[in-house]
Image (tube, rainbow, N blue to C red):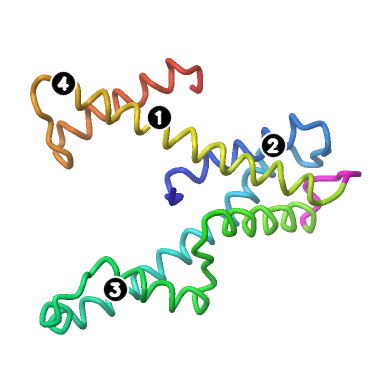
Amino acid sequence: MKVSLSHIPHIASRIAVDLNRSGLVTMTHGLEATARAAEKILVESVKQEMALEEKVKSIVSANEEQIDYYLADERQLFFMIKKKLAPEFGVILSYEDRYSDIAHKILDELYEEDLINYDVSENRIKNIIYDAITTFIADTSELENAVYEKIKTYKRRVIPGTDEYEILYEKLYKDEVARRGMA
């Protein structure tokens, strides 16, 4: 799952909390400073991917006539162009590899800014950060699926993208978060 800018503060907080709970690190400036440093790296990564996707969209739209003429699959072309340009933008397309790279960058930032101290291998700390990211994403995906399933059970069809849908989605999402004790 792709990380959005709205998820970043939650992921950053989870990283800070998980590091603190691990008992393997000592935070020199508290949870908030650690979360801010993680957030900085996460925002940078998401913005890199957004810039890449903007460039790909502009290429696709500039060649729309040819795409239509050859009856090419626009989504497949989008991904192929994105794959070709990804190294130029510093974006790793494999989510597993990307989150591992981000976890390493966060660890480097925390260490260089003297926000944490630890006496174990860097890999153990990096794995805590990686697990915090991937667990948050899995939880979010599971929550979203539960909300979508609830919306589908409504007798009256609610159309995605409408204000009514967005309001209903937000309400059900908050209810689901509270029900699972994640609030």
Residue type pointed to by label 1: Leu
From this view, report whether residue 107 is shown above or below residue 60. Answer: above
Q: CA distance from mark 4 to mark 3?
A: 37 Å
- Magenta-highlighted stretch: main secondary structure? loop
- Say which of marks 1 and 3 sits in front: 3
Mark 4 vs 3, N-terminal side? 3
The residue located at (66%, 52%) in the rendering is 103
Residue at disc 3, secondary structure: helix
Residue at disc 4, secondary structure: loop
**Residue 133 within the magenta-colored segment of the rendering:** no
x and y percent of residue 138 in the render? Answer: 49, 37
Mark 2 vs 4, N-terminal side? 2
Residue type pointed to by label 4: Tyr
Tell me where the magenta segment starts and ends, as one range.
Answer: 113-120
Residue type pointed to by label 3: Leu
Label 1 packing within 10 angstroms: few (<14), some (14-19), many (20+) = some
Mark 4 near mark 3, Cβ–Cβ under 8 Å? no
Mark 1 vs 3, N-terminal side? 3
Q: Which mark is residue 143?
A: 1
x and y percent of residue 126 in the render? Answer: 73, 49
58 left or right, relative to 109: left
- Say which of marks 2 and 1 sits in front: 1
User: What residue is pinned by disc 3?
Assistant: 77
Mark 2 near mark 4, Cβ–Cβ under 8 Å? no
Residue at disc 1, secondary structure: helix
Mark 4 near mark 1, Cβ–Cβ under 8 Å? no
User: What residue is pinned by disc 4?
Assistant: 154
73 left or right, relative to 50: left
